[in-house]
Image (spheres, grey):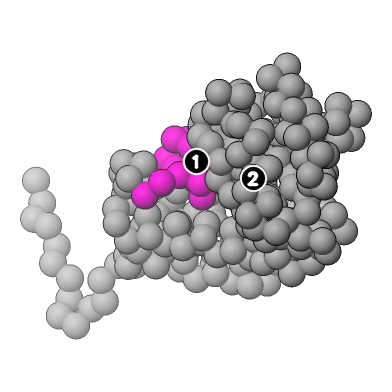
Amino acid sequence: MGRKRLPEPGAKAPAHSGTGHRARLRQRLLDGGDEALADYELLEFLLFAAVRQGDTKPAAKALIARFGSLAGVLNADAEALKGVKGVGDAGAAAIRSVSLAARRMARGKVRDMPVLSSWQALLDYLAIDMGSLTRERVRVLYLNTRNRLVLDHLAHEGTIDEAAIHPREVIRKALDLGATALILVHNHPSGSPEPSRADIAITRRIAEAGAHLGITVHDHVIIAGDDHVSLRAKGLI
C-alpha cells in the first residue's frame, strides 16, 4: 500500500466541488427574467446569506418537500422552518424577511388605490397572505366612501359560522370606524374555494344587517392556494 502523497509546499488546495456555483446562480438571477431560477434555487440563494460556505441545495429542496411549494415555505413560521435540517435561525430569518417584504409590497398596492378599481392587486395580496395557511382565517376589509382600505381586521380564526362571526359586531365595527362598505375574506385550507352553505348564509346575514344602516357588503372572497371564488360574481349576494 503506497504512502499518501503530501502536496508540494505553497501549492493551492484542490477546488471544492461547489466552487463557482454561487457565482453562477447569482449571474443567472441578474441576467435572466422572472423564471431564471427554479423555486428551490431561489431558496438556495436566500440561504447563501445564512450559510457562508457549503452547499445550500439540500436544505432548499428539503424546504420545498416539507412545505409543498415556494409559497408554502414563505408562509411557514420560523419554528417550522428551523425544523428543516440546514436552515437554523439565520436561514429562517432570511426566508421570513423575504416573506414579509412580499406581503408589505402587495399590501401597499392595495392601500394606495381604491380597492374596487384595483381588484387584481387585492387578490394578489390575499393569495400571498392567506393562500398557504393551514387554518381557516376570517378577515373583514373595511372601506371608506372612496372605497379605500380603512382597516384589514382579523375577525376570527377557525371555521366560519354565526357562532364565531356575529353580523351585528361586524356592522358595529364598521360604524365605529366610519366605514361605509366592507369585503369579507376567508381561506379554505382544503384547496377548494367553493363556498359552503355556512359561508353563503353568514354573508347574507351580514349584508342584510348592513343594508339597514347604510353599510354595503361588496363581496365575500374565498381564497384557496392561488385560486379564489367571489360570492358576488356567483350571484350569491
Amino acid beneath label 2: Arg
Q: In this view of the protein, which residue sits in the foreground, 165 or 132?
A: 165
Residue 220: x %, y % from top left:
76, 37
Q: Which mark is residue 64?
A: 1
Amino acid beneath label 1: Ile
Mark 1 lies on a secondary structure that is helix
User: Which region is colored magenta?
Assistant: 61-78
Name the residue rendered at 42%, 40% in the picture.
62
Give the spatial CA distance, label 2 vs label 1: 43 Å
Q: Residue furthest bottom?
A: 10
Residue count near mark 2 (Cα–Cα under 10 Å), binned few <14, some 14–19, many ≥20: some
The reply, left or right, for residue 121 in relation to residue 161 is right
User: Disc count in the image?
Assistant: 2
Residue that label 2 marks: 172
| Quadrant of the rendering where the C terminus is positioned | top right
Name the residue rendered at 50%, 71% in the picture.
23
Q: In this view of the protein, which residue sits in the foreground, 12 or 159?
A: 159
Q: Looking at the picture, does residue 193 appear above or below residue 83?
A: above
The reply, left or right, for residue 175 in relation to residue 232 is left
Q: In this view of the protein, which residue sits in the foreground, 23 or 103?
A: 103
**Which secondary structure is most common in the magenta stretch?**
helix
Q: Looking at the picture, does residue 38 appear above or below residue 30?
A: above
